[in-house]
Image: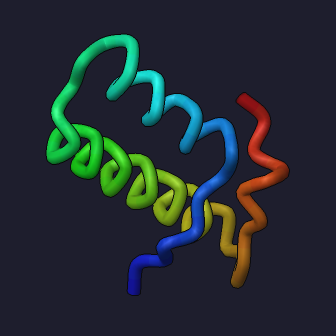
Amino acid sequence: MQSNKSCQIVEQYLAYLITIKGRSKNTVLEYRLDLLQFFHFIDISRSQEHMDFQFVNI
């Protein structure tokens, strides 16, 4: 099951794509889903039950 959790830096990046880069909201929503799926993959690959995205080191 996919989580809807995100982190502040991801949300800021997505806002940047809309406001500065002029990407459509639908495109940005798809990017957000891709990023959440990636974080979910990382979570599973590390064999952790729960990952707090606040600690993701960019």
* Residue at image coords 41%, 78%: 2
* Residue at image coords 22%, 42%: 25
* Residue at image coords 45%, 58%: 36
Can you say whether 53 is above or below 19 in the image? below
Can you say whether 42 is above or below 8 in the image? below
Q: Quadrant of the N terminus?
A: bottom left
Front residue of this view, candidates 22 and 34: 22
The mark total stands at 0
Q: Residue furthest front?
A: 19
- Figure quadrant of residue 5: bottom right
57 with respect to 39 (left or right): right
Q: Quadrant of the C terminus?
A: top right
Q: Position of residue 57 (x, y in %)?
A: 78, 35
Front residue of this view, candidates 7 and 49: 7
- Figure quadrant of residue 6: bottom right
Q: Position of residue 18 (x, y in %)?
A: 33, 28
3 with respect to 50 (left or right): left
Colour scheme of this structure image? rainbow
Can you say whether 5 is above or below 28 in the image? below
* Residue at image coords 47%, 61%: 41
46 with respect to 21 (left or right): right
Q: Position of residue 39 (x, y in %)?
A: 53, 55
